[in-house]
Amino acid sequence: MKLSLSFSFLSLNFDFFDKIWLFIFWDKGFKMSRVCALTGKGPMVGNNVSHANNKTKRRFLPNLRTVRIRLEDGSVKKIRVAASTLRTLRKNKTN
């Protein structure tokens, strides 16, 4: 079973397991979390390091972009996708 997603610049095909994961992801209310809907990239933890070598905790957030996708049934959904994922999709797009 395939799921086709079409952006304004490319179209994607997902297999059955990716489709299940994507809809579980939408249904669980993760729409506004800081997680990429396609790759699952999320915040990372690290340190701010001062000139005096003092270390304080900080978060590195993914660069998320909201993208409209068209599903097979013609409906439109908005998902949040990392900018690095969009670059990879553009690079690997299939016609």
Image (tube, rainbow, N blue to C red):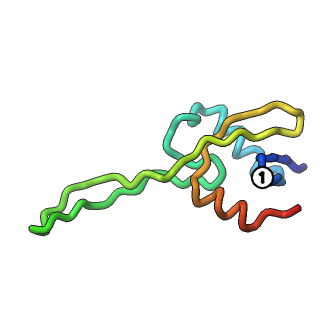
Farthest front residue? 9
At 62% from the left edge and 55% from the top edge, which residue is drawn?
39
Farthest left residue? 52
Front position in the image: 60 or 28? 60
Front position in the image: 9 or 71? 9
Front position in the image: 26 or 90? 90
Q: Whole-percent x and y of residue 49?
A: 20, 64
At 35% from the left edge and 57% from the top edge, which residue is drawn?
45
The local crowd at label 1, few if under 14, some if 14 to 19, many if 20 or more residues have their Cα within 10 Å, is: few
Counting every numbered tag in the picture gives 1
At 81% from the left edge and 47% from the top edge, which residue is drawn?
6
Q: Going by the image, does 55 lie left or right of 37?
A: left
Quadrant for residue 47, please give it.
bottom left
| Residue carrying label 1 | 9
At 29% from the left edge and 53% from the top edge, which residue is drawn?
58
Q: Going by the image, does 12 lie left or right of 89?
A: right
Q: Secondary structure at mark 1?
A: loop
Q: Relative to 76, is 1 above or below?
A: below
Q: Whole-percent x and y of residue 86?
A: 65, 56
Q: Whole-percent x and y of residue 3?
A: 85, 47
Check disc 1 and give the amino acid type. Phe
Q: Relative to 40, is 69 above or below?
A: above
Quadrant for the C terminus in the image: bottom right
Q: Going by the image, does 69 lie left or right of 37?
A: right
